[in-house]
């Protein structure tokens, strides 16, 4: 899992500095998987004999939230990739506009 995530991040030009955050993602993925595999019943009887939600559900939910936050931060979700692509396009558009304006002012091409 680590190799797959780091490979994807390296392709995107992510710096070594972000590898710690990738480590958080890997740990969250593993904990989520463990909770899912151990989860048999949604409800359990607690030590006082009351029926309550299985504590593994909270672990599963918390890890899923961590996964989404970190994956989004690293640009590993479809929505995050779309936002990054749109930001790059906007930046290219702004740069093109500035270059055209500069060319007009100094009498260059265009």
Image (spheres, rainbow, N blue to C red):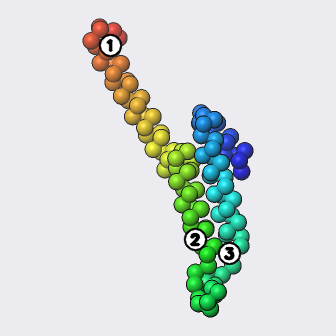
Kindly identify which residue carries mark 1. 103
Relative placement, left or right, of 3 versus 24 is right
* Place of residue 43 in the rendered image (x, y in percent of width and height, measured from the top left): 61, 84
Quadrant holding the C terminus? top left
Q: Which residue is mark 3?
A: 39
**Image: 33 above or below 38:** above
At label 3, counting other C-alpha atoms closer than 10 Å, the crowd grade (few under 14, some 14-19, many 20 or more) is some
* Front position among marks 3 and 2: 2
Q: Nearer the viewer, mark 1 or mark 3?
A: 3
Residue 73, how many percent across, how many down?
52, 47
Q: Is residue 74 above or below residue 42?
A: above
Q: Residue furthest left?
A: 105
Say what secondary structure mark 3 lies in.
Answer: loop
Disc number at residue 58? 2
- Pick whichever of labels 3 and 2 is earlier in the sequence: 3
Q: Residue at x 38, y 25 (%)?
A: 95
């Amino acid at each position: 899992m680590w190799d797959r995530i780091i490979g994807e991040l390296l392709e995107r030009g992510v710096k070594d500095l972000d590898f710690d955050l990738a480590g958080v993602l890997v740990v969250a993925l593993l904990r989520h998987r463990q909770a899912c595999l151990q989860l048999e019943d949604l409800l359990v009887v607690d030590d006082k004999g009351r029926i309550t939600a299985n504590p593994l559900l909270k672990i599963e939910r918390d890890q899923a939230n961590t996964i989404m936050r970190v994956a989004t931060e690293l640009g590993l979700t479809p929505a995050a990739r779309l936002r990054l692509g749109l930001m790059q396009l906007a930046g290219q558009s702004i740069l093109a506009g500035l270059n055209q304006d500069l060319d007009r002012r100094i009498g260059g091409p265009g």
